[in-house]
Image (cartoon, helix red, strand yellow):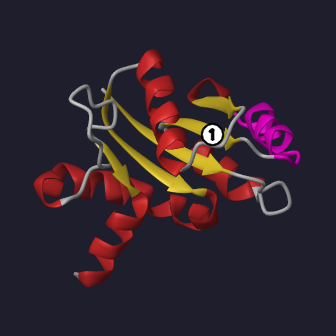
Amino acid sequence: MHSGIIIIFNNDEQNIDTNPILDFLDKNNFKICLVNNASTDKTIEALNKIKLQANASDNIYILDNSRNKGLKYAVKAGARFLLNEADFENMIYLESNIIMYLKHIEEYFSQIKLQKELLSQYQTRSDRNVLSNVFPFKELIKMNESC
């Protein structure tokens, strides 16, 4: 079973720092889905550049949503995409503005395994929940700060 990461981007071309993502990928074996959520700038080109530069490019998937239907839609699309590639025990999603926390993500996956019942999974109304075992990274950061 794998651990997956979904990172949501929207008009972040100017703010994407490839170094933290590439450093993270070089040191870890997570499957990552970079979701371009209908950006009108050149975000998709920046994401493709990350995939080209990564040593572990087999672990990076890029999803280009043509319409922005909101964060939940983007997370769900990323989760579906990853689930089509492999089996996942847990997934964490984060928005591009908190990429600096990637370096701590292994700790958070450990935390999920130990305290899964205390964490809030991504909420949905559907019985066929593609978002089960998908956790918001912001929840994990808050939980860590309160300890």
Quarter of the image with the N terminus in it? top left
Q: Is residue 139 above or below residue 24?
A: below
Q: Is residue 125 left or right of residue 26?
A: left
Query: Label 1, on which residue?
Result: 35
Q: Is residue 54 magenta-colored?
A: yes
Residue 28 in sight in this render: no
Residue 52 to residue 111: above or below: above
Amino acid type for the residue under numbered disc 1: Val
Where does the C terminus fall, quadrant-wise?
A: bottom left
Residue at figure coordinates x 63%, y 40% from the top left: 34
Q: Where is residue 93? Give x, y as percent.
A: 46, 49
Q: Residue 45 placed where, x, y %?
A: 86, 38
Q: In which image quadrant can residue 20 be found?
A: bottom right
Nearest to the observer: residue 28 or residue 108: 108
Main SS of the magenta segment? helix
In the rendering, at what x and y percent does residue 106 appear? 39, 53
The residues colored magenta run 40-55
- Asked whether, in this view, residue 53 is left or right of residue 89, the answer is right
Residue 109 painted magenta: no
Q: Is residue 106 left or right of residue 68?
A: left
147 versus 43 height, above or below: below
